[in-house]
Image (spheres, rainbow, N blue to C red):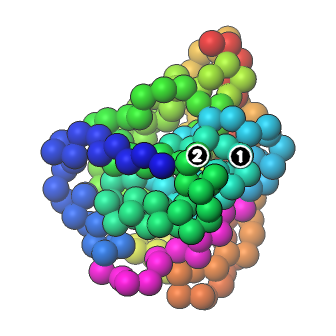
Amino acid sequence: MTDRNADTDRVPEEAARFWERVYADRAEPVWSGRPNPLLAETARAIAPGTALDLGSGEGGDAVWLASRGWTVTAVDIAPTALARTTARAVAAGTAVAQRLTVEQHDLARTFPAGTFDLINAQYLQTPFDLPRARVFQRAARALAAGGLLLVVDHGSVRPWSWDPDPDTRFPAPEEIYDALDLDPAVWRPERLDRPRREATGPGGQTAMVTDTVVAIRRLTG
C-alpha cells in the first residue's frame, strides 16, 4: 500500500481543518465502514479494474472495492480519514492493502493523475466552496474508454446532517449532468435518477431519504 501526500501545502486551511476535525475529534469511526449501497449495486455488475474514490472518508467504499479485486486510489482532504482507510485496508489483509493507494487532495485545486475504469463520488457535498462541475468534468476526462463515473448526492435533508434546513434545494440529476457540458460523442448519461431508501445515520438513527444519482459512461478514449 502506498501513501502519496499530494500538494498538502496548497490545501485551504479552513476546509482542511474542518474536515480533519470531523474525524480527529472522534476516537471511534464516524461512518459505518459499509460500502454505500448505490456503489455496491453498480460495481457488482462491472469487472474489476482501476477505481478512484473521491472524498473517500474512512475508506468504506475504497476497501470494499479493493476486497473485490479493484486497484483503488482513495482521495480525501483529511489526513485522519486517510490514516483510517489505511488501517482498514491492512485489517482486511495483505492482498487488499496492496491494491489500495491513498492520496490527500483538495479537489478544488488538485486532482489525482491517471485514468480509471470506475470513478466513485459519493455525497461529495461540503459547506465550503467546491467547484463541483469542474471536479466532475475532470473526473469524466480521467475515465478510460468504457469507464463509468458514478456521482451520488443527497437529494433530501438527512436529520443528522450538519445543516438540516428543510428548505434546502437539491438539484435534479439532469441539472447536475447538464452543468458538465460534456460532448455527447464522448460521454453519455447511463442513469439520471432519484431513488428513495431507508438510511442509517452516524448515531444509528434511521430515516427515509432520497439520493440523486448521475452515472456517466465514457464511450471513447
| Number of marks | 2
Extreme residue in the front direction? 94
Magenta stretch encompasses residue 70: no
Per the image, label 2 sits on a secondary structure element best described as: loop
Q: In which image quadrant can residue 220 be found? A: top right
Tag 2: amino acid:
Arg
Q: Do the CB atoms of the residues marked 1 and 2 lie less than 8 Å apart?
A: yes
Image location (x, y in percent) of residue 33: 59, 71
Residue 99, which numbered label? 2
Depth check, front residue: 26 or 89 = 89
Image location (x, y in percent) of residue 42: 76, 48
Mark pair 1, 2: CA separation: 8 Å
Above or below: residue 212 compared with residue 146: below
Point out the stretch of residues depicted in magenta.
25-37
Residue 12, which numbered label? none
Residue at horizontal 72 percent and vertical 23 percent from the top: 146
